[in-house]
Image (cartoon, rainbow, N blue to C red):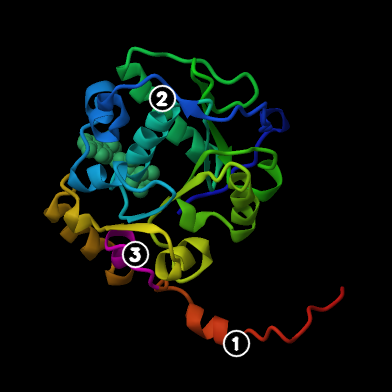
């Protein structure tokens, strides 16, 4: 499960002036994200990843198993947007700064395949600045540290492990820009915004990608994992099921039923 890191004060995240995105000079080959990924980034998406790259990008949820390739496909989408829409601000949030840094590092590695080694944006420790004014910025999904961005495309990686309070701070950053939002995660029980959006959300493009449908995961490995971790955990980690943890004393349903919204909290 994702951990939380404390962040040194010097690694604060800041916004700089956000220009309105505008189309770069592109060709049909560059406009198509799948062709761009293959020919420019050296990333060869499998058929489901192709669908993701070509998805209506406004609200997208990837509920995928461990190691399925969520962050990789997200990185390809991020670079494609930065490249084809000049002046875009693309924000990556996740439970910790380290995890957002991993996502941005993946973007950087893909850019190496294009023969590029871009610098940061000069304001944020985890960032990539493009010559066309676009930038990709990584932040921790932690409420107090992420205000002040106007975002054209946002990724919340490991979204099921990001607190609702951070989500409530992140979403308004898309308001003025009419920006796009991608949630990427494996499930983590029937709680939180990732579960709510996947189970009940309208106007989302939803992808479900269990391990037995991933061409890179060996069926024998899955059998071994199921035997080692037990059915419940296996179903969560590899079959994308929103089940309760085996060691949970109370089910989420029981907890929800026990809650009484009419009782005011004690004023301590
Ligand atoms: N289409 C692809 N072709 C080849 N390798 C791929 C492809 N997609 C993903 N991978 C590889 O699969 C591995 C897992 O990818 P990635 O880290 O993006 O998965 P993830 O779902 O984000 O994993 P985690 O659950 O650990 O966060 C990486 O080594 C990545 O390079
Ligand atoms: Mg990942």
**Spatial CA span between label 2 and label 3:** 35 Å
Return the residue nearer the eye: 151 or 224. Answer: 151
User: Disc 2, ligand 1: is the CB inside 8 Å?
Assistant: no
Tag in front: 2 or 3: 2
Secondary structure under tag 2 reads helix
Q: Tally the marks.
A: 3
Question: Can residue 125 be found in the magenta stretch?
Answer: no
In depth, the one of 228 and 85 nearer the eye is 85
**Vertical comparison of 116 with 79: above or below:** above
Tell me the residue that label 2 is attached to.
83
Residue 22, percent across and down? Answer: 49, 27
Classify 10 Å Cα crowding around label 2: few (below 14), some (14-19), many (20 and above): many
- Tell me if residue 157 can be seen: no
Q: Position of residue 160 (x, y in %)?
A: 47, 58
Residue at image mark 1: 258
Mark 3: few/some/many CA within 10 Å (<14, 14-19, 20+):
many
Percent from the top left, x then y, of residue 181? 48, 48
Task: Compute the Cα span from label 1 to label 3.
Answer: 25 Å
Stretch in magenta: 234-243
Disc 3 secondary structure class? helix
């Amino acid at each position: 499960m994702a951990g939380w890191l404390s962040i040194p004060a010097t690694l604060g995240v800041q916004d700089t002036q956000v220009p309105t995105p505008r189309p770069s000079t592109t060709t049909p080959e560059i406009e198509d994200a799948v062709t761009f990924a293959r020919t420019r980034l050296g990333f060869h998406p499998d058929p489901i990843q192709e669908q993701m790259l070509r998805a209506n990008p406004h609200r997208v949820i990837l509920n995928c198993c461990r190691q399925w390739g969520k962050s990789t496909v997200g990185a390809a989408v991020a670079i494609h947007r930065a490249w084809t829409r000049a002046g875009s601000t693309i924000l990556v949030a996740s439970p910790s700064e380290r995890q957002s840094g991993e996502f941005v590092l993946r973007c950087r590695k893909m850019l190496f395949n294009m023969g590029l080694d871009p610098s940061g944006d000069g304001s944020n420790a985890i960032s990539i600045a493009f010559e066309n004014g676009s930038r990709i910025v990584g932040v921790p999904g932690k409420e107090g540290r992420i205000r002040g961005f106007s975002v054209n495309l946002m990724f919340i990686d490991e979204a099921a492990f990001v607190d609702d309070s951070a989500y409530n701070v992140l979403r308004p950053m898309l308001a003025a820009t009419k920006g796009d939002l991608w949630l990427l995660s494996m499930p983590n029980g029937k709680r939180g915004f990732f579960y709510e959006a996947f189970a009940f959300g309208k106007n989302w493009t939803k992808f479900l990608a269990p391990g037995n449908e991933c061409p890179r995961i060996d069926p024998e490995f899955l059998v071994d994992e199921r035997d080692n971790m037990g059915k419940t955990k296996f179903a969560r980690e590899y079959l994308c099921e929103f089940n309760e943890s085996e060691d949970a004393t109370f089910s989420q349903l029981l907890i929800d039923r026990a809650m009484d919204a009419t009782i005011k909290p004690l004023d301590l």
